[in-house]
C-alpha cells in the first residue's frame, strides 16, 4: 500500500491528525535538509513536503521565496531533491514524502523520466502548484502508472462543482488553501475555513489537509478539528532563514505544532 | 481550425498558451474569459472602446512614408506605423483602454499592473486616473533605476509604484509580484497584463485590443501603397506590439511577418532576451511558451539595453507562429539597436523607443536587400523620450 494512504489510515485509527511539514530542498544545504527531515519525523511530523526550488515561485510569500533563493544559490535541482529522498529512505521507509513545486522544474527531466525516478527513489506524491487539472493530463497518467499520488489544491475561490471535479482527479490527500493569497499569509479565518471544509468533505473520501497561515499552536488548534491534517511551511522556512541552531529550532517548532493537534 | 479562431477553448495555440496557475486564480480567469466572450462582440462595448481609441488615444495613428530613410538605405520603401504618437507615447495604451473598460464592466475597484520599461505602467496609471480607480504598479528595482522618468509619471498619475526586489529585479519578477497581489486581492482587483502573455485569456485579450494597429495598416496600405505591404517588422519582448500588427495579416500569406528579439550582448554570449531564437519550451507566468531557461528548468537572467524587451518568455501565439513557420524571428543586439535609434532620429526626426529600435535595426539590414517596388511596414511601437537617460549614460554623458 502507498505510504500516504497507510499513514492517514493509521492516524484515523488513533483518531489523530496529520502534521504535514514543508521545507525547501537544499535550504540552506542538502545535508541540513536531511537532518531537518529526520528531526521533524522524530518530533511528530507525519508527512514531509519537500519544496523544489524554482527561480519564479509565484504562489509563495516572502519567507518561502527566500528559501527557494537560498537553495538556488547552491544550484539545487529536482535531481538533487530525488537524491535527497533516497538518502532519507535509507533510514526511513514509512514517512511519506511529497514533492511540491512548479511545473517547469518538474518537466525539466521529462515527465515520464521524473515519475519513474521519483517512484524508484521513494517519493509518494507530487503537488505542482501551477498545474490545475486542465493542464495535468500527462502528469496524471505517468504519476498514476508509477504509483505516485497527485495532490491537488482547492482554494476558497473554488466553487463546489469544480471542487468535486478536482477531488475526483486527486489522490493521496486534498490540500485546502485556507486563505486567498500566497504562502505565509496571516489572516486565517477559521469560521470560513470550517464551512468550506465541511462542504468539501461531503465531496470526497480523501483526507483533507489545511494549509496557509498555520504557524503556531494557536493557529494549529483553530483548524485541527476541521480537517484530517494541517500543513505548516513558512514558519519552518523562516526559522531556517534566521540561521543559528536550525535543527534545535525546527525540532522545537515541530513539537509545538504536533502537541497542539495530537 | 483556422488561425483566426485560435486560441482554442482551453486557451491554446497549438501546444502553447494554456492556463498554468494556482487554483485560487482559476475561477477568476474563468470569470474573465466568460465576461470577455460576452463583451468582445457587444456593440455598446465596441463603440465605447473605439470612441476612446479615437478621442482619448488619438487614433488612427499615421502610416508614415520614411522617404529620407528609404533613400538612405536604398532598397524597399519603408513605412513607419506611428504608435509613438499615441497618447502616453506607445502602443501600450490600446490595451489598457480596452482592459479598463472590461474591469469596470466586471465591477472591479482596484487595478494592478506589472511594468518593465514603464510604458505599460504609465498606460495603466493613465486609464486608472481617467476612470477614478485605484492603481498599483509593480516594477523591478533595476527597471525603476533605468526608467526613472516613467516612475515619476506614474506617481503623478496617482499610481502607487511598488519596487520589486526579488529574483532578477526586472519585468519577470514584477509579474510574479503582480500575480501574488492578484491571488490575495482577487475579489475586488483587476490585473491588467501588459503583453500577449500570461494565462488564458490574457494573450487573446491583449492581442485583440492591439489588433487595431494591423487593422489600420490594412486600410492605410490600400490608400497609400495600393496593396498589402510585403513585409511587416516589429520588436518582440512579450510581443504585444508585434501581434497587434501581425494578427490581422496572419491569413494574408503573401505578407511576410518578422519579429525582432533583443540580442543583448549577442546570442553567443547568452546575455540576451531572445527565447524564440535561443530558448526552449517551458511553463512560466501561467503559459506554455518558449523560455530562456537552464537544463534544470530555472529561468535565466536576461539582458537587453531596453527594459521593455528584458523578459525571458514570449507570448504563446508567437511560439506557435514560429513553429508553424508563419512568422520569422530574428535578433538585433544592443549595439545595432542603438545605431538604429540614432539613425532614425537624425534622418527622420523621429526618436524611437529603444525597444522599437530593435525592429528598426532589422529594417536597416533587410531594406537594402529588397527591390524599391517592395514595401516594409515597421511598427514604431513607442517614442524614445523615456530612454534618453539610458542612451546618454551609454555615451558617458551625465544629464
Image (cartoon, rainbow, N blue to C red):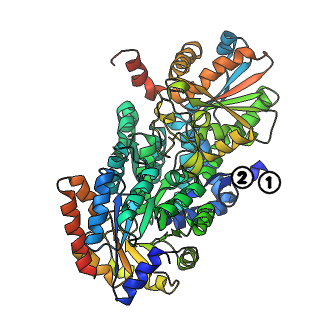
Q: Front-most of A150 and B347?
A: A150
Q: Which residue is mark 1?
A: B1
SS for callout 2: loop
Q: Is A111 displayed left or right of B387 in the figure? A: right
The dot on residue B6 is 2
Of all residues, the one furthest to the front in this rendering is: A90
Q: Front-most of B263 and B389?
A: B263
The residue shown at (66%, 63%) is: B38
State how far apart marks 2 and 1 are (Cα). Answer: 8 Å
Q: Quadrant of the C terminus of chain B?
A: top left
Image quadrant where residue B31 sits: bottom right
Query: Mark 2 near mark 1, Cβ–Cβ under 8 Å?
Result: yes
Q: Quadrant of the N terminus of chain B?
A: bottom right
The residue shown at (72%, 40%) is: B215
The residue shown at (47%, 39%) is: B300
SS for callout 1: loop
Mark 1, chain letter? B
The dot on residue B115 is none
Q: Is residue A6 positioned above or below B220 on the image?
A: below
Amino acid at each position: 500500500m502507498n505510504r500516504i494512504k497507510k499513514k492517514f489510515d493509521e492516524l484515523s485509527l488513533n483518531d489523530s491528525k496529520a502534521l504535514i511539514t514543508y521545507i525547501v530542498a537544499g535550504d540552506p544545504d542538502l545535508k541540513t535538509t536531511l537532518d531537518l527531515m529526520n528531526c521533524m519525523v522524530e518530533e511528530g511530523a507525519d508527512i514531509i513536503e519537500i519544496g523544489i526550488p524554482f527561480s519564479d515561485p509565484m504562489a509563495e510569500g516572502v519567507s518561502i521565496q527566500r528559501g527557494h533563493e537560498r537553495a538556488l544559490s547552491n544550484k539545487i535541482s529536482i535531481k538533487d531533491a530525488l537524491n535527497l529522498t533516497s538518502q532519507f529512505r535509507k533510514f526511513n521507509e514509512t514517512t511519506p514524502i511529497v514533492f511540491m513545486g512548479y511545473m517547469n522544474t518538474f518537466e525539466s527531466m521529462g515527465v515520464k523520466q521524473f515519475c519513474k525516478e521519483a517512484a524508484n527513489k521513494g517519493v509518494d506524491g507530487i503537488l505542482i502548484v501551477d498545474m490545475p487539472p486542465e493542464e495535468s493530463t500527462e502528469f496524471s497518467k505517468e504519476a498514476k502508472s508509477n504509483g505516485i499520488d497527485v495532490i491537488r489544491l482547492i482554494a476558497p475561490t473554488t466553487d463546489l462543482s469544480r471542487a468535486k471535479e478536482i477531488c475526483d482527479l486527486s489522490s493521496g490527500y486534498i490540500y485546502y488553501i485556507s486563505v486567498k493569497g500566497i504562502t505565509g499569509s496571516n489572516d486565517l479565518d477559521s469560521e470560513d475555513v470550517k464551512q468550506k471544509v465541511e462542504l468539501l468533505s461531503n465531496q470526497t473520501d480523501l483526507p483533507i489537509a489545511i494549509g496557509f497561515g498555520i504557524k503556531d499552536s494557536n493557529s494549529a488548534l483553530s483548524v485541527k478539528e476541521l480537517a484530517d491534517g494541517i500543513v505548516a511551511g513558512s514558519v519552518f522556512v523562516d526559522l531556517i532563514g534566521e540561521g543559528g541552531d536550525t535543527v534545535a529550532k525546527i525540532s522545537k517548532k515541530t513539537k509545538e505544532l504536533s502537541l497542539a493537534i495530537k | 481550425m483556422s488561425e483566426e479562431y485560435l486560441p482554442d477553448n482551453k486557451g491554446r495555440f497549438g501546444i502553447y498558451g494554456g492556463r498554468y496557475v494556482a487554483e485560487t486564480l482559476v475561477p477568476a480567469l474563468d470569470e474573465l474569459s466568460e465576461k470577455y466572450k460576452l463583451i468582445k462582440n457587444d456593440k455598446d462595448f465596441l463603440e465605447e472602446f473605439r470612441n476612446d481609441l479615437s478621442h482619448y488615444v488619438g487614433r488612427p495613428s499615421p502610416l508614415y512614408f520614411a522617404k529620407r530613410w528609404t533613400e538612405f538605405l536604398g532598397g524597399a520603401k519603408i513605412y513607419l506605423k506611428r504608435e509613438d504618437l499615441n497618447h502616453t507615447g506607445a502602443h501600450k495604451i490600446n490595451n489598457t483602454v480596452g482592459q479598463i473598460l472590461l474591469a469596470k464592466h466586471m465591477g472591479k475597484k482596484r487595478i494592478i499592473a506589472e511594468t518593465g520599461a514603464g510604458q505599460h505602467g504609465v498606460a495603466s496609471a493613465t486609464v486608472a486616473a481617467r476612470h477614478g480607480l485605484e492603481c498599483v504598479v509593480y516594477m523591478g528595482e533595476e527597471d525603476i533605476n533605468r526608467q526613472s522618468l516613467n516612475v515619476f509619471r506614474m506617481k503623478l498619475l496617482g499610481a502607487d509604484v511598488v519596487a520589486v526586489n526579488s529574483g532578477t529585479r526586472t519585468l519577470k519578477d514584477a509579474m510574479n509580484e503582480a500575480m501574488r497581489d492578484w491571488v490575495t486581492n482577487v475579489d475586488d482587483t483587476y490585473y491588467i497584463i501588459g503583453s500577449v502573455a500570461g494565462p488564458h485569456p490574457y494573450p487573446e485579450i491583449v492581442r485583440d485590443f492591439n489588433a487595431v494597429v494591423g487593422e489600420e495598416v490594412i486600410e492605410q496600405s490600400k490608400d497609400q501603397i495600393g496593396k498589402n505591404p510585403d513585409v511587416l517588422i516589429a520588436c518582440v519582448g512579450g510581443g504585444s506590439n508585434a501581434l497587434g500588427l501581425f494578427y490581422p495579416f496572419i491569413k494574408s500569406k503573401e505578407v511576410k511577418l518578422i519579429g525582432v528579439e533583443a540580442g543583448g550582448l549577442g546570442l553567443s554570449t547568452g546575455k540576451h532576451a531572445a527565447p524564440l531564437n535561443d530558448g526552449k519550451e517551458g511553463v512560466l507566468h501561467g503559459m506554455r511558451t518558449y523560455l530562456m531557461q537552464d537544463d534544470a528548468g530555472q529561468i535565466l537572467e536576461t539582458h537587453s539595453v531596453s527594459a521593455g524587451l528584458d523578459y525571458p518568455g514570449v507570448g504563446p501565439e508567437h511560439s506557435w507562429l514560429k513553429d508553424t513557420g508563419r512568422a520569422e524571428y530574428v535578433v538585433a543586439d544592443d549595439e545595432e539597436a542603438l545605431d538604429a535609434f540614432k539613425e532614425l532620429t537624425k534622418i527622420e526626426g523621429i526618436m524611437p523607443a529603444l525597444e522599437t529600435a530593435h525592429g528598426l535595426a532589422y529594417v536597416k539590414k533587410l531594406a537594402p536587400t529588397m527591390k524599391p517596388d517592395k514595401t516594409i511596414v515597421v511598427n514604431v511601437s513607442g517614442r524614445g523620450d523615456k530612454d534618453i537617460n539610458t542612451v546618454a549614460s551609454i555615451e558617458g554623458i551625465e544629464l
